[in-house]
Amino acid sequence: MGKGLKAALRSQQSRLRIKEKVQIAAQAALHKGKKASSRSEQVASAPRSKGKGKEKQFLANQQPTIPFQLTDKILLVGEGDFSFTRALALDPPSVLDSLPPRNITATTYDTEQECYRKYHDAEEIVRMLKSKGVEVLFGVDATKLEKIQGLKSRKWDRIVWNFPHAGVCQGAFPHQK
């Protein structure tokens, strides 16, 4: 592909990402009954300063990135103690207050017994999630989702794998105290 085509493709992709962000922000604002303001208005209204403080000021005015929409079907894999699922389903950011818990499927690699043994809060968290309608699955190898009976024929809008780790407990390495 020529340099001109690559540049045109990157430019188009950038415009599409910006358009999608604007649409999501507008949808969230409509949902909350507020008028969406443009990114340029937010930046323009920020106080000006010189030096290193500019970046911090700009970042302070930024809204958090919420990668979900209210209608998304979300698959969370490798959850561990299900604390991310709890935050998303039971204490979501305000733009996701109406996200139906039934749209969330949370999975962990561990069996149910292993999970509860490893993470002391997990059993209570799972009980709360299930009572709200979140689907919780144990013993799910996220590298082989197509082989999991309850998952292979389903589709999701978002699949999230947060902070996967090797399953090693704290202090297992000699250099750790």
Image (tube, rainbow, N blue to C red):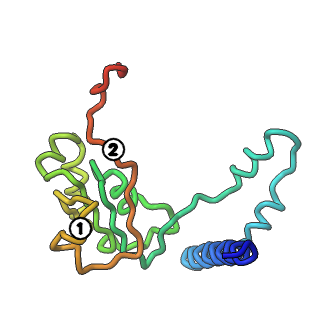
- At 71% from the left and 75% from the top, the residue drawn is 2
- At 36% from the left and 60% from the top, the residue drawn is 90
Q: Is residue 175 visible?
A: yes
Q: Name the secondary structure under disc 1.
A: strand
- At 19% from the left and 70% from the top, the residue drawn is 147
Q: Quadrant of the C terminus?
A: top left
Q: Which picture quadrant has residue 71?
A: bottom left
- Give the x, y percent position of residue 135: 23, 67
Q: Looking at the image, is 140 positioned above or below residue 23? A: above
Q: Left of 108 or right of it: where is 71?
A: right
Amino acid type assigned to the residue bearing label 1 in the image: Glu
**Label for residue 165?**
2
Q: Left of 6 or right of it: where is 51?
A: right
Determine the residue located farthest toward the front in the rendered image: 2
Q: Answer yes or no: do the residues labelled 2 and 1 have beta carbons within 8 Å?
A: no
**Label for residue 33?**
none
Q: Which residue is mark 1?
A: 135
Q: Which picture quadrant has residue 169?
A: top left
- Give the x, y percent position of residue 61: 71, 54
- Foreground residue among 162 and 39: 162
Amino acid type assigned to the residue bearing label 2 in the image: His
Q: Residues within 10 Å of mark 1 (few under 14, many from 20)?
A: some
The label nearer to you, 2 versus 1, is 2
> Which circle's residue, 2 or 1, is located before the other in the chain?
1
- Foreground residue among 117 and 102: 117
Task: Count how many numbered circles sit on residues in the image.
Answer: 2
- Give the x, y percent position of residue 161: 37, 57
